[in-house]
Amino acid sequence: MAMNYNAKDEVDGGPPCAPGGTAKNRRPDNTAFKQQRLPAWQPILTAGTVLPTFFIIGLIFIPIGIGIFVTSNNIREIEGNVFMYYGLSNFYQNHRRYVKSRDDSQLNGDPSALLNPSKECEPYRRNEDKPIAPCGAIANSMFNDTLDLFLVGNESDPTPIPLKKKGIAWWTDKNVKFRNPPGADIPLEERFKGTTKPVNWVKPVYMLDPDEDNSGFINEDFIVWMRTAALPTFRKLYRLIERKNDLHPTLPAGRYYLNITYNYPVHSFDGRKRMILSTISWMGGKNPFLGIAYIAIGSISFLLGVVLLVINHKYRNSSNTADITI
């Protein structure tokens, strides 16, 4: 049956109504929210409000930056506990595919994920028709150089410095995020049965340390490496040198010998390796970046305040002169 079309039959641009039907109104309700009549506040930027803001930011940030920078530079190697770090340069742990190349369920000890890792781990998911544990590119590229520090005496043989390898990982990582497969009464090797080591590893994960409390997925060297860095030049905690008593420094003055077992090549990505000894302060280890950032932001804000003050003073005087001339 044909039906005549009339533009008057449409309401607010909607389709025509059927004969005898009720017209539908698509207009929003007459409320403050739907009609956009809610109260709003819009700041009016004037010289009297902008200039004090720039000066206040500068006066606050510059002293804070100086304090942080001085504190960072005052960190020494002979006071308190000493932390040994290894550092890498030109290694991009922040690459998107690299960061995603892991299976957190497997690292948490899930038996099903242990034998069937996530596809995010490709191409380091399986090897020799066996699932890799731990899978992924992060685990496959784990730093594995060995560092040993010795104090060289005048006539005696070098004295090894005790390096503590436990207590270097975050508590939440060690006790929550990383767990070995279940089975406290079963040998660790049996719990990883049916898996194989990562391609670039020399030994399987259950042989990372003779101590079962520091082997497998809960090995602290492994946990530290799995926390990816944000920048291509970074450092990671390797060992802890504990202070024995308050009468003697942790590392007395003298000659030291560092023995490095070279296992980790860096030539393929044009990288560099380094070892750092440092103490910590209330703001952590030695890192001047935060202090420099505060000083830079404060200085820029203060300088902008001065420039805007001069511009405002100049044009305000010009305006007053023009008014007098008229």
Image (cartoon, rainbow, N blue to C red):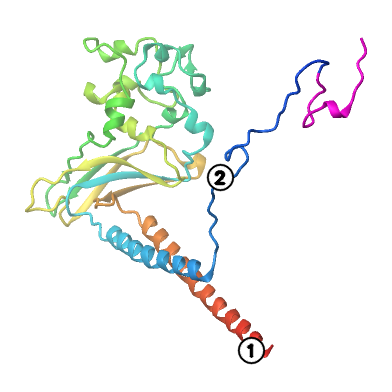
Q: How far apart are labels 2 and 1 at the CA level? A: 44 Å
Identify the residue at image location x=45%, y=65%: 53
Q: Mark 1 highlights which residue?
A: 324
The reply, left or right, for residue 204 in relation to residue 74 is: right
Q: Nearer the viewer, residue 54 or 25?
A: 25
Mark 2 or mark 1: whose residue is earlier in sequence: 2
Q: Is residue 262 above or below residue 15?
A: below
Q: Nearer the viewer, residue 295 or 146?
A: 295
- Residue 311 in the magenta stretch? The answer is no
Q: Is residue 249 above or below residue 140?
A: below
Q: Pointers 2 and 1 in contact (CB under 8 A)?
A: no
Q: Nearer the viewer, residue 55 or 19?
A: 19
Quadrant for the N terminus, please.
top right
The reply, left or right, for residue 77 in relation to residue 55 is: left
Kind of residue at disc 1: Ile
| Res. 38 mark | 2
The reply, left or right, for residue 138 in relation to residue 35 is: left
Label 2 neighbourhood size at 10 Å, few (<14), some (14-19), many (20+)?
few
Quadrant for the C terminus, please.
bottom right
The stretch in magenta equals: 1-17
Q: Is residue 75 above or below residue 120?
A: below
Quarter of the image holding residue 164? top left
The reply, left or right, for residue 224 in relation to residue 13 is: left
Kind of residue at disc 2: Leu
Identify the residue at image location x=41%, y=37%: 228
| Res. 261 mark | none
At which x and y percent is residue 21?
78, 16
